[in-house]
Image (cartoon, coloured by chain):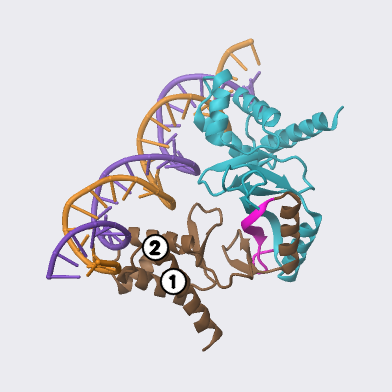
Chain colours: A cyan, B brown, C orange, D purple
DNA sequence: TTTATTATTGATATTAAATATCAATATCGT
DNA sequence: ACGATATTGATATTTAATATCAATAATAAA
């Protein structure tokens, strides 16, 4: 099995476990949204509206509210994360790995988002938290500026 | 002159310069809001609503829209920054120094916000940006978790 | 398998923050 | 003081997020 396929199964299991734990139900709609989101949005940052419009094409009967609620569910179950890049719309992204935390550089000109990971930043940050006796649950680093295409630099 | 007083004057100058450059006008209201914001909200993170409620007590005639627009103006002129800690409300904070960038640890239990600065993180981050030919204009790092009072740790 | 229970769905309504509108007014250069 | 232009404050509008609820679907129990 490829690593991608393996990751996919893990996510599915995490989600199913969450569903079971919270005594929720698995539904057709959740399956459809799950597949669309995790097949086509790895490494992307989709708004509820965007995903809804996408899914509507193949499944016109699925409502906005269901997409909205399902993305929240993904987040709660820990398989997706919610981001906010300052345009007032929440964006969701599939979590690829529990261990490697990544961050974002957002071009304020073209809106392009490039991701990066940096071990040193991670370790500094946990060190700072430890010093302040702060129990880290989550963190986000966003760099705003001009990407290589847009920047004069 | 104390360093604080000096910083205050610098901010005022920056703001006045911005007003001049953009051919805007200085008004009573802007003065009042400037003073309230920079006298009482250093190191704090105030919402438009909160600042409006505060100012209304001493100046009942000032409208919400004016406070809203003035805070945006402070941000545009570079003397305040806008933050968003995930509760759906924008918060404004006076910028204390152009050079020393600071970040936030937000307690998800009690809402307490503790600030920190870390040279190493700053340098890593600029290094990453340079590698990606990304021209940094701004950046923010937020750590979410439990503070020393709320955390079981 | 049928029934009972409970969660989900989709349409729509509501809320809340951000922002736009506009007539009356204040500011500022001449 | 005058005229041009920006600002103000009240209110309206927009937009994203979230709540509501009757109809329906999923699961557990009989």
Between discs 1 and 2, the one toward the N terminus: 1
**What is the C-alpha distance between the residues marked 1 and 2?**
10 Å
Q: Is residue A132 visible?
A: yes
| Picture coordinates of residue C30, whole percent (x, y) | 25, 66
Q: Which residue is mark 2?
A: B70
Helix, strand or loop at label 2? It is helix
Q: Nearer the viewer, mark 1 or mark 2?
A: 2
Image position of C10 with respect to A126: above or below: above
Give the quadrant of residue C3.
top right
Q: Nearer the viewer, residue B142 or B13?
A: B13
Categorize mark 2 by other alpha carbons within 10 Å: few (<14), some (14-19), many (20+). Answer: some
Nearest the camera: B111 or B3?
Answer: B3
Q: Main secondary structure of the magenta part?
A: strand
Q: Is residue A142 visible?
A: no
Residue located 63% across and 24% down the image: A32
Picture layout, residue B29 above or below residue A118: below
The image position of residue B78, as x and y in percent, is: 51, 64
**Whole-percent x and y of residue A114?**
68, 44
Q: Which stretch did the figure color magenta?
A: B134-153
* SS for callout 1: helix
Mark 2 belongs to chain: B
Same chain for the residues at labels 1 and 2, yes or no? yes
The local crowd at label 1, few if under 14, some if 14 to 19, many if 20 or more residues have their Cα within 10 Å, is many
Chain under numbered label 1: B
Q: Quadrant of the N terminus of chain A?
A: top right
Please identify the quarter of the rendering in which residue A27 is found. Answer: top right
């Amino acid at each position: 099995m490829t690593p991608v396929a393996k990751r996919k199964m893990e996510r599915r299991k995490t989600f199913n476990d969450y569903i079971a734990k919270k005594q929720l139900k698995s539904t057709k709609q959740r399956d459809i949204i799950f597949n669309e989101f995790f097949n086509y949005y790895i490494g992307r940052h989709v708004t509820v509206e965007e995903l809804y419009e996408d899914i509507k094409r193949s499944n016109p009967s699925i409502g906005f509210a269901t997409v909205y609620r399902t993305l929240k569910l993904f987040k709660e179950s820990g398989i997706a994360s919610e981001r906010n890049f300052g345009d007032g719309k929440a964006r969701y992204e599939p979590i690829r790995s529990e261990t490697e935390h990544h961050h974002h550089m957002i071009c304020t000109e073209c809106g392009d988002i490039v991701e990066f990971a940096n071990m040193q930043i991670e370790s500094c940050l946990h060190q700072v938290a430890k010093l302040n006796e702060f129990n880290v649950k989550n963190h986000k680093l966003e760099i705003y500026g001009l990407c290589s295409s847009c920047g004069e630099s």
